[in-house]
Image (tube, rainbow, N blue to C red):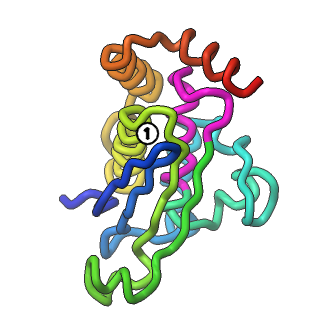
Amino acid sequence: MAGLFDIRSITVGPEKCTATVAVVLGAPLMTSDDLEAAAAVYYLAPGIVDQACLGDAGKTFKDCMGSTEIAHLLEHLTIEIMSKTGLAGKVVCGRTRTVSTERASELMGEQYAGRVFEIDLSCPDDVLAIGALSSAAFIMEWAFFHRDQPAPDFKGTVAALAQLVESLSGTTADQGADSAGDAEA
């Protein structure tokens, strides 16, 4: 079975990663199309509802979670994973926007109009951001397509990602949080 998302590209910049992501044909486009799946994501990562969410229905993601694009849910789940590693610093943020119909058609064909998104993620570490995005996509695929299977281990996923980033950078979660705090002061 195809995944929920087709990650077309990831661009890594000095301060952010931008992922171009298509929601596969036949999959729900909005969280309101499958509220049980959106709730399954929430039950694994309840902190997503308290995240600031600018430009939507309210001040937090909770205010729009029941009726937003699933790519937007992917953004918030990715941010939650990054935050939970302790390696992302104090401010982790993102932004999701639909790409133009022309760009969607170029990338995937005209049937993908409205189904291709760009997700910007603050990028304290590219491995952390890309690993969190990949992990979030996996969790959401389970929630939307495979809820009859055992749930992913959210805490284990976060710990494994933190261990991977630490092994590549020589930083520990505590050091990452401390140095990020110093940088903002």
Left or right side of 184 for 71: left
Residue 139 image-quadrant placement = top left
> Residue 8 versus residue 65: which sits nearer the camera?
8
> In the rendered image, which residue does mark 1 sit on?
129
User: What segment is highlighted magenta in the picture?
Assistant: 73-92
Name the quarter where the C terminus is drawn.
top right
Q: Residue at x 36, y 20 (%)?
A: 160
Query: Main SS type for the magenta part?
Result: helix
Residue 182 in view: yes
Left or right side of 116 for 6: left
> Residue 33 versus residue 20: which sits nearer the camera?
20
- The x and y percentages for residue 23 are 37, 68
Residue 10 image-quadrant placement = bottom left
Left or right side of 9 for 70: right
Q: Residue at x 37, y 22 (%)?
A: 165
Residue 45 image-quadrant placement = top right
Q: Is residue 75 magenta?
A: yes
Q: Residue at x 47, y 43 (%)?
A: 14
Dot 1, crowdedness within 10 Å: few (<14), some or many (≥20)? many
Residue 147 in view: no
Left or right side of 98 for 162: left
Q: Residue at x 40, y 85 (%)?
A: 113
Name the quarter where the N terminus is drawn.
bottom left
- The x and y percentages for residue 100 are 46, 83
> Residue 114 versus residue 11: which sits nearer the camera?
11
- The x and y percentages for residue 103 are 37, 82
